[in-house]
Structures are given as structure tokens and as C-alpha cells.
Amino acid sequence: MASVEPFRVKMVEPLPNISRDERVNAMLDSGYNPFKVPDRLVTFDLWTDSGTTAMSSQQWAAMMESEEGSFIPDSYFKFSETVESLTGFLHVLPVHQGRAAEHALFSVLGKPGFTLFSNTLYATTKSNAQLVDMATTHLPCTWVDGAPFNGNIDCYKLEEELAGVEADHAMVILTMTSNNQAGQPVSMANIKRTSEICHEKGIRMFMDGCRFAENAYFIKVRDTRYASCSVRDIAREMFSYFDGLYLSAKKDGLCNTGGLIAVRNEGLFRQLRSWLNKTEGKWRLGGLASRDHKAIVTGLLEGTEDRYLNYRIETLTQFGDLLKKAGVAIVEPVGSAVYVNAAKCLPHIPTHQYPAWALNCALFVEGGIRGSHLPDVLYVEESIDRDHRKHFVKLCIPRRVYTLSHLMFVADIFKQILAKKERVFGMKIVSEDHYYKAQLAPVV
């Protein structure tokens, strides 16, 4: 039986509705870069699920009840109590978004020769590490087609890497779910083993918990030992193996802004608090308004409800099934986003002509759809095989925003494109820059 949205719609927003000719002109004006197309021209924006959530009536009501301008706001204490209850971490600090949390943590702990080990890191996390001269090492597990937990870290390689490393010169971060491993979750067994390795060596272990609730739900449905457990109980066990957590509340916190850091060690908490006083203002506010605290508190509770997560993950799975029926090659099993193998969808385009970029452009022209390609997509070689992640188009589903009929429309656009795929041309770089700014042109 298909899952049902655990909410009803109380307010609607018109979808942008421009003609195909207008979209063609927009693509020309953008230099064939979907990221340079103004949002108002995009009908279905699937490039990110961060900060794009439709907040609930309870969140908006809580925001309206807040009082602003306090030096010691009541909203902070409710924020702290809720995070402590969900995670078990005693020391909690709000921040204006996840990047601020990363920057504070790395600035406090970083020192010359410090190395950060991870299953994989977000591009921004890696950049924040580099800002304080941290080295980063990715140790993703070996990908196994169809495996339930392809987001794991390779514990054997981790032990090898940590041999001889001084405890205060390293840190391990598990990103959940693993964005650069096709949004796949990390298993509880992998979390526990990683924790054992770290604690044996006295090395701190942190969770990048942007999608901690989704990761917990994947454990519930993919590990039979947890089938009867609530998501909150699973998440609480996950947190028990870590020394701390940081996250952007713009994902599983169901908010449009905000984030947090939570740690066990009081000394580290005091160091972070002092740093945030300099960079975020009053540490109890963390660069946020009191109303944002209230929205995050409510969002964290709503985002960890089993009923909501069943709808969320089943919707992603259903979307993947719709795409497969349309003949689209996707990464399976579907994780926290749907990853489309553009190179397999467009086999006539050589891999050095950016099939992922070409498919993303075609999606916008034909259906007003914007997906995302990975940050290093500009650096491809002819020899890169068609299963390489650089050829993936990522389709994120903003939470509580689009309906099943919207996703059916997206699948229909894919079907139309693949039916006449020869009309989709490869791409060449005209002006190389960051992939948000690059200009390309069709290879005709």
C-alpha cells in the first residue's frame, strides 16, 4: 500500500509556468548553466532539499509566540532541552546554519598537522577544514550494488590510517546520510565499530547529522534488528557512540535556516561558546532570532516522527520507481535523494562531453526541472567509466513541498527526453570556473 502524506495542505503557492521557448532563451542567457537560471523561471527545483522545506502550522505558530531582543531568551532553554532529549548531549549551541557549526568546530580543534577522516564530506565541510589548514581523507566503503548501507566508512582503512596518528591531531566525522555516496545511509554496526576504533585511540568522533533522522529510518527498514524500534530510539543509540554532533537544521530539522552543535565535553563546549560569541554574536542565539529557535525545536520533533519519515522515504522510493518505469538508470537502492546515471541514460554522449550537465539542461528546457550535478563534474576525462559518480544528476525532493502528481510529471519529462535522446547534445566548456558560474555550449 502506498504511503499517504501525514498532513493536509493549508496554503498553496503557484508554480512558475513559462513556455518552452522562454526556457530555451533562459538556457541561452545562462550559458547552458542551470544554476544561473533565476529561481522564478524554474517550475520544479530539485537541486537541493536544504532550506526548502514547507514548514508546518505548528512551526509558524511557535514562531509567532516568540519574544525577540532578550539577552537570555527563553527560546534557548527550550532549544537546548529538546536537543538534549533527542540526542543525549548535555551541551548545546545554536548556530545560523551548518557551515557555521563546521567552522567553529574546526577552528577550535584544528592545529598544524591535523587530519580529518570521514566516509565522505560535503564540499563546504572540506572547504572549512582547508580554511584552518586541516588535511582531509575520505575513506568510503567499497560500493556494492544493491547493498543497504553503502554510506559506511571503511573501518579497515581507517585503522590503517590512524596507526601512529596522535590523538589530538585527528578527528573522525561520519556524514549521515553520505551525500557523496549517492545519499546512502551508515549502518549501526559501522557506527559502533568506528566508535570503538576512535575511542581505543582517544580520537574524537563527530556526526555530521544533517540527515540523522533519515539515516535512523533507513536503519529501521534495512536492519531487521531495529524493525520494531522507533526512529527516536534508533537515533538516540546512534548519538551514543559519538563525542558530538553538528548539523544544519535545514534538512531533517524541517526549517529554512539554522543549525546546532552538541557535545559531551564541557571544556570543548566552553571553547566553542567563546568562539561563537565572536562569530555568531550572543552564543545563546547563535546568529538566529528567537523565533528560529522555536521553529527548529518543533521541526526536530516533527522530523523524527516515524509516520512522517515513512512518508518521506517511501516518497523517494516511489519516485525512483517512477523513473525506472520511464527507462531511467538510477542508483539503487534509493537513499536520501535520487541519483540518475546520466551517462547510461544518454549513451550516445561521450563521457568527456558532460552527459550529466547535458541531461540537466534538457530537463530544464523540456519541463522546467532543475537537478544538480556534483561539484567536481567539470573535471572529467574520456576514460572515466559510465558508472562514475561524476556522471550522476542528483534529484533532491524538498520536504513536504511537491506531491506525487508533481513527481509523476517529472518522470514523464524524463520519458520524453529518453524517447528522443539523440536530440540531446554533449557539452563543451566555454568559460571554466566554479560549476555554479561556468559557461558551456552544445557540441553540435
Image (spheres, rainbow, N blue to C red):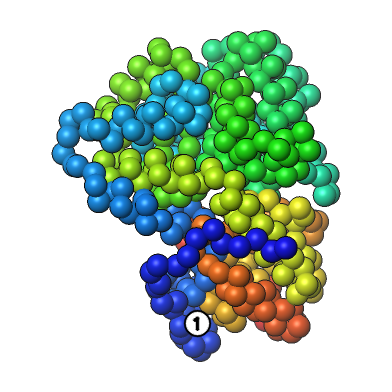
Residue 204, given in percent of the width and then of the height, sits at 56, 18
10 lies left or right of 197? left
Residue 293 in which image quadrant: top left
Q: Quadrant of the C terminus?
A: bottom right
Q: Position of residue 186 (x, y in %)?
A: 69, 37
**Residue 362 position (above or below residue 66):** below
Give the quarter of the image for residue 90. Answer: top left
Q: Is residue 315 above or below residue 276?
A: below
Q: Residue at x 46, y 79 (%)?
A: 26
Q: Secondary structure at mark 1?
A: helix
The total number of labels drawn is 1
Q: Quarter of the image containing the N terminus?
A: bottom right
Q: Is residue 291 visible?
A: yes
**Which residue appears at 52% of the width and 71% of the height?**
44
Amino acid identity at mark 1: Arg
Residue at 49% from the left image edge and 88% from the top image edge: 19
Q: Residue at x 70, y 31 (%)?
A: 188
User: Which is nearer the eye, 250 or 371?
Assistant: 250
Circle 1 packing at 10 Å, graded few (<14), some (14-19), many (20+), is: many
Q: Pick the residue in front: 380 or 302.
A: 302
Location of residue 52 (image quadrant): bottom left
Q: Position of residue 173 (x, y in %)?
A: 59, 29
- Of 167 and 235, nearer the camera is 235
Q: Which residue is mark 1?
A: 23
Q: Where residue 348 sits: x, y (%)?
A: 79, 74
Asked whether the viewer can see residue 435, the reply is no
Question: As drawn, is 188 to the left or to the right of 52?
Answer: right
User: In the drawing, does residue 26 fall left or right of residue 184?
Assistant: left
